[in-house]
Image: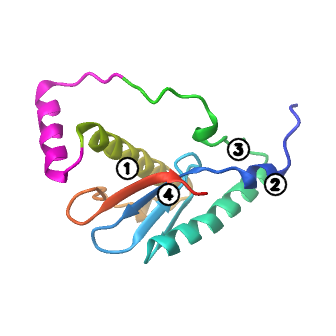
Amino acid sequence: MRKRKPLDYYLSLKYPVLLVAEPEGGYTALHPDLEGCVSVGETPEEALANLEEARRLWLEAAYEHGDEIPLPSTEREYSGRVLVRMPKSLHRRLDEEAKAEGVSLNQYIVSLLAERSSLRALKRELTRTGRAAEAPDSWEWGTSSGGGIWTGVLA
């Protein structure tokens, strides 16, 4: 059995954050690397403060249960480049949507991927904890009509 690092080590790690401005108001914040570690708030500051508490509780629970705790993706080595092949019609539609949002095609695709990946993690967590009924039939969070996404690592 591999020796485990102390809990304080994991608590000190800086995990990437995804902050979503909800079109209806309020914010959702989550750590994509920590499946199901999600919080909400009326303001970005409140959502991020709530996420800090959720992260601490998530890490403590995982540590106590002996679960493997993933390192932040910022600690892993990735090139940040992926080649994606798609139909021309999808390429055109994504390009038009990016222009309508006023961002580059690359930025738009990254935001869509980050959003969808995080929402899938949230849905998996709701299912895992027996709260799948709370998951909406369709996920309509996004970057358009008043919503927005911020990703990064908190200092």
Give, as a single range, the part of the protein colored magenta: 83-103
Q: Where does label 1 land, which residue?
A: 115
Depicted 62 relative to depicted 82: above or below:
below
Judged by depth in the image, the label closer to the viewer, 2 or 3, is 2
Helix, strand or loop for disc 1: helix
Q: Where does label 3 land, which residue?
A: 69
Residue 36's image quarter? Answer: bottom right
Report x, y in % for residue 44. Answer: 45, 70
Residue 8 is tagged as 2
Crowding near the residue tagged with mark 4, few <14, some 14–19, many ≥20 C-alpha atoms within 10 Å? some
Q: Is residue 35 left or right of residue 100?
A: right
Residue 126 is tagged as 4
Marked residue nearer the N-terminal end (1 or 3): 3
Q: Are marks 2 and 1 in contact (CB under 8 Å)?
A: no
Please, what is the three-letter code of the amino acid marked with disc 1?
Answer: Glu
Judged by depth in the image, the label closer to the viewer, 4 or 3, is 3
Which residue is more in the foreground, 106 or 22? 106
Q: Is residue 64 left or right of residue 14?
A: right
Helix, strand or loop for disc 3: loop
Marked residue nearer the N-terminal end (4 or 3): 3
Please, what is the three-letter code of the amino acid marked with disc 4?
Answer: Leu
Q: Are marks 4 and 3 in contact (CB under 8 Å)?
A: no
